[in-house]
Image (tube, helix red, strand yellow):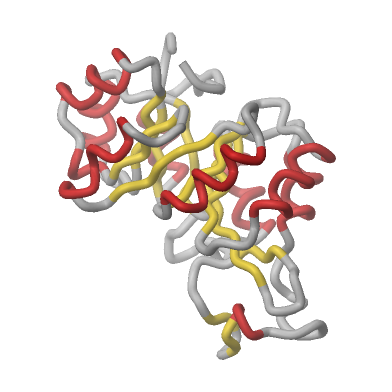
């Protein structure tokens, strides 16, 4: 891509004076600061709701066993896509299996106009989504060097390693394979600049304000190489 990397808020925003992460208020603030979009986490309740939450529990309740009427304060996947489909690049991280149908329906009803990726640490989720759709844009997240080479065998458009795993050679290899690289969670200005110098395509940060200040002028969304 040309210009700056894609600038994405991690769970919207995660700094001390900000709204709670993975909320509409956090997403709104990341965009207000000038980010191109944001990353967020999706889990599934026992009653079948696709809710936005990073941890296994919310309000002391296990999300996987939550029934209808519980955890109604959590935004749903459909809420996020309908609200931001025209205004943000969306990195939709699936934390658990079983959300494949929800994601495909939500994307069909609210196609993100500024680009998106459905990402996961779990290869089985990515393989299931690819089996159901040839068009969906997928990304493999990795935080361990021993698992990093799996990106070569998975049917993904995006490779999303933890920033400490990235080298300039890895960026070149990913680009040579016609794939796009995002990285997380980068909260240091010098690290942001180094990664941009290596031509990483997008940077995910807890601190959207610092991210935008580091790259004034913003970026254009990418949808895969």
Q: Determine if residue 12 is in view.
A: no
Q: Seen in the image, is 222 located left or right of residue 180? A: right
Q: Position of residue 166 (x, y in %)?
A: 20, 35
Farthest residue toward the bottom?
A: 60
Q: Position of residue 72 (x, y in %)?
A: 77, 77
| 22, 54: nearer the viewer | 54
| Quarter in which the N terminus is drawn | top left
Q: Residue at x 43, y 60 (%)?
A: 15
Residue 156 visible, this angle: yes
Quarter residue 74 falls in: bottom right
Q: How far from the left and from the top, in percent, is residue 182? A: 39, 34
In the rendered image, the vertical position of residue 150 relative to residue 218, given as above or below: below
Residue 130 sits above or below residue 52 on the image = above
Residue 169, located in which quarter of the rendered image?
A: top left
Left or right: residue 11 versus residue 64 is left
Tell me the residue at 62%/29% (across/down): 134
Q: Residue at x 26, y 37 (%)?
A: 189
Q: For this view, does 3 lie left or right of residue 197? A: right
Give the image quarter of residue 117.
top right
């Amino acid at each position: 891509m040309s210009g700056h990397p894609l600038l994405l808020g991690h769970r919207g925003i995660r700094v001390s004076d900000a709204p709670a992460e993975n909320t509409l208020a956090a997403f709104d603030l990341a965009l207000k600061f000038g980010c191109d979009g944001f990353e967020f986490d999706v889990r599934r309740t026992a009653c079948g709701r696709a809710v936005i939450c990073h941890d296994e529990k919310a309000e002391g309740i296990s999300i996987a066993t939550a029934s209808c009427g519980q955890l109604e304060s959590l935004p749903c996947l459909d809420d996020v896509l309908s609200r931001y489909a025209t205004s943000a690049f969306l990195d939709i991280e699936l934390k658990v299996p079983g959300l494949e149908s929800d994601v495909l329906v939500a994307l069909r009803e609210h196609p993100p106009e500024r680009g998106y990726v459905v990402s996961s640490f779990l290869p089985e989720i990515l393989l299931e989504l690819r089996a159901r759709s040839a068009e969906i844009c997928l990304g493999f997240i990795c935080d361990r060097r021993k698992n990093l080479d799996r990106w070569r065998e998975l049917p993904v458009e995006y490779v999303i390693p933890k920033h400490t795993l990235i080298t300039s050679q890895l960026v070149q290899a990913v680009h040579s394979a016609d794939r796009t690289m995002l990285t997380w969670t980068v909260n240091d200005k010098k690290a942001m600049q180094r990664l941009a110098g290596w031509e990483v395509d997008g940077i995910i940060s807890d601190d959207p304000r610092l991210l935008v200040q580091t790259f004034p002028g913003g970026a254009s969304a990418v949808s895969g190489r």
